[in-house]
Structures are given as structure tokens and as C-alpha cells.
Image (tube, grey):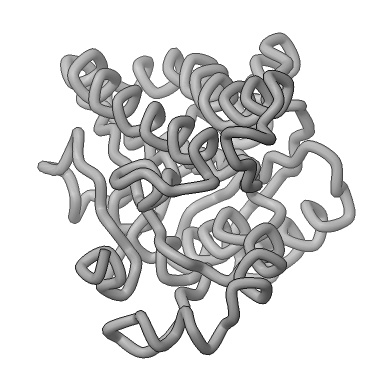
Amino acid sequence: MIDLSGQHILIIGGSRGIGRATALMAAQAGADVSIHYARDKAAAKEVSAQVRALGRKAIEVCADVLDEKAMNLATQEAIEALGPLSGLVVSAGIFEPAPLGEMTTEFWDQMINTNLRGTFFAVRAAAPSLRSRKRGSIVILTSTAGQRGSAVYSAYATSKGGQIMFMRSMAQELAADRIRVNCVAPGWTLTDMSRDTMEKLGMDDIIKKAPLGRIGKPEDPAAATCFLLSDIAEFITGSTITVDGGMDMRG
């Protein structure tokens, strides 16, 4: 059984989707949770209330992931409220298509900056607290698109592939402080961010291509994330766990 008792987990993008599912699952496993959000304060407060209902401590912290100073302040606010970090989950990001001939420079920059630079700011802000404990776990939510590429989603896939290389580099750099760094790569997972795209592609068609016969739920990658946060995974670093129901086998 996954046990996160006594841990303080900061979840970037914790008010919705996979981040929200991870926050609740971590709390069920005994962790106190800091919920980062960028805009939807009400959603973040709702997650915090559910964490407290599970008997754990929670706080909401607000910052634009592209505002370095704000991310530093939000991380410090979380630490002052709930103590040094035991783990960091980076789940914030954007997901949109754009064919090459229609893609603007502004679109490319927004995708790369939000998904990749935002990850860099989050990890750099949390690293000193994790290093102070000489122990910890960082989990970055990437995507199967970052492992294999994806037509029409080239900017998104590139940002997610960059997250994987950043993770592998950080795993090497932070290992001396016993900080493990890994990625979880979901396939098609039904969240508010992906719902419109999945409905346009056809839910039934996606399910037909899934070897396990269903679309992913936020709880699926959340479970892999909590596993990586726990001591059960103490000898795993620099790895990417694919959570896609076997769809990547189909190409």
C-alpha cells in the first residue's frame, strides 16, 4: 500500500484534472498537500476542502507558471504553511493543436514556454527545500506525445519531449541529494483540457484503439504519480512511466 504519511506534496496545477486527482490520492495516502493554481481559486479551494475532509492539511497558492518571482513566492508560501517539501508534482500545462502551415510563432512560444519553462521554474523553486531534507521526489506529468511525436500537435509534443529530457538531466543532477526525478506519461485521459479534442476525434474511435478497452481517467496517472512519490519507488529515478492502457503499442 502506498504510504505518504508525514509528507508535504506541492502540486503545480492541482486544482483540476490529473493534478486534482493526485492531490486527493496523496491525501488519502497520508500527505499534506499544497494546491497551486493560476486562475480558478474556487476550484483550488474545493480541492483543499476535500483534502481537509480526508484529515490532512492543505493550502492553496496562486502563481502564473511563467512568472518566476510569483512561482518562488508561492513555493515559499507553501513551505511556510506546511513545512519543507517532500515532493513536487508538475501537472500544469496547455494542450492545443496547430498544423505547421497555420502555426504562428506566438503559438509555438506559448506552448513551449508554458509547458517547458513553467516546469523549469517549478522545479528550480522547489529544489532548495527538497535538498535541505536530503530526500525527496519530483514527478513531472508529460505525455505519450512527448515520447513518439504527434502530427498537428508538434509544439505540444516538443514541449513534452523537452520535459522528459529535463527530467533525465535533473535525475542525474539531484541524485547526490537523494532526490528522485521521474515522469508519468499519460495517453488519452479524459480531463477538462482534453475533452473537446477527444469528442472531436470520437470517443468510440479512441476506445476501439485501446487494448484495455477504455479511455484513461485522471486517477490512472495519479496512481502512478503517488507511487513515484512514495518510498516504494525509492530506487527509481530518471524513468518515464507510460500510463495509456496499452495504446502506444498500437502506434
> Left or right: where does residue 236 sit relative to residue 159?
left
Residue name at image x 35 percent, y 17 percent: 131
Residue 103, image x, y percentages: 66, 31
Residue 26, image x, y percentages: 48, 59
Whether residue 198 is situated above or below residue 186 in the rendered picture: below
Residue 87, image x, y percentages: 42, 38
Residue name at image x 78 percent, y 37 percent: 38
Instruction: Give the camera-side residue of 234 and 38.
Output: 38
Count of numbered tags? 0
Instruction: Give the camera-side residue of 53 and 206.
Output: 206
Residue 64 seen in the figure: yes
Instruction: Spot the residue most to the top.
Output: 69
Instruction: Spot the residue most to the front.
Output: 101
In the picture, the quarter occupied by the N terminus is bottom left
> Left or right: where does residue 208 sit relative to residue 179?
right
Instruction: Give the camera-side residue of 111 and 22.
Output: 111
Residue name at image x 87 percent, y 47 percent: 41
In the picture, the quarter occupied by the C terminus is bottom left
Whether residue 183 is situated above or below residue 134 in the rendered picture: below
Residue 188, image x, y percentages: 47, 67
Residue 77 seen in the figure: no
Quarter of the figure with residue 176? top left
Whether residue 168 is situated above or below residue 212 in the rendered picture: above
Residue name at image x 53 percent, y 89 percent: 204
Instruction: Spot the residue most to the right.
Output: 42
Whether residue 83 is situated above or below residue 50 in the rendered picture: above
